Image (cartoon, grey):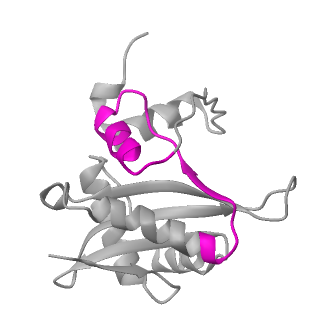
Amino acid sequence: MTPQIIKLNSRDIKRFTELIRLFEDVFEMKNLVMPSAIHLQKVLSEETFLSFVAVHDNKIVGGLTCYILPAYYVTSSSVYVFDLAVLPAFQRKGIGRMLIESVKEYSKNLGYKEVFLQTEVEDQHAIDFYRATEGFEEQTVLFSYPLINKFQIFRFVISKYGNSHCTDD
């Protein structure tokens, strides 16, 4: 079983929607409201957005999304992998590695200087996977500045992760 890796374009709204539903399932997101097809087409049309999917038997079984980040210290850009997921039944079959290799090759061919991503410290499964793909591990601290009020943040966390991620701390 070798899936086909496809780079999505602005006409691939159906596949992009399927990928988002895959993310919803794998990341256990609750109550996701799918953006409009117009919005999704706009995202796919952006020159700074990339998405690759793994297709097996006409079904998306994995995929990733990336953002191209222009640099100002050098003339080449970097590529940030925003999301990567593979359906549980298809994990540990090399699909995630194929997706990473596809974005690396694509980025290299365009002269970009690096592909990078981040994962949560608690997600040992993801850390082990990224180590196996021979990336260089760096320790960083991420700061986030939410631009919505606390009630909206609470609703976002509940909708994305469920009640288990909300504490009284």
On the image, the x and y values in percent for residue 57 come to: 16, 83
Along the line of sight, which residue is nearer the eye, 9 or 140?
140
Is 141 drawn above or below residue 117 in the view shown?
Answer: above
Q: Does residue 67 appear left or right of residue 53 in this picture?
A: right
Q: Does residue 165 appear left or right of residue 72 in this picture?
A: left
Position of the C terminus by quadrant: top left
Position of the N terminus by quadrant: bottom left
Q: Does residue 35 appear left or right of residue 139 in this picture?
A: left
Is 102 drawn above or below residue 125 in the view shown?
Answer: below
Report the residue that reaches farthest toward the front. 134
Residue plotted at (25% across, 62% down) = 94
Report the residue that reaches farthest toward the right. 73
Along the line of sight, which residue is nearer the eye, 6 or 148?
6
Indicate whether residue 40 is drawn in magenta.
Answer: no
Along the line of sight, which residue is nearer the eye, 70 or 43?
70
Is 40 drawn above or below residue 62 in the view shown?
Answer: below
Residue plotted at (66% across, 39% down) = 147
On the image, the x and y values in percent for residue 146 come to: 63, 35
Residue plotted at (37% across, 37% down) = 127
Q: Where, by quadrant of the figure, is residue 78 drawn?
A: bottom right
Residue plotted at (48% across, 90% down) = 11
- In the image, the segment drawn in magenta is 108-135
On the image, the x and y values in percent for residue 139 come to: 57, 28
Q: Is residue 20 visible?
A: no
Report the residue that reaches farthest toward the bottom. 11
Could you tell me how many numbered marks the image carries? Answer: 0
On the image, the x and y values in percent for residue 128 come to: 33, 38
Report the residue that reaches farthest toward the top. 169
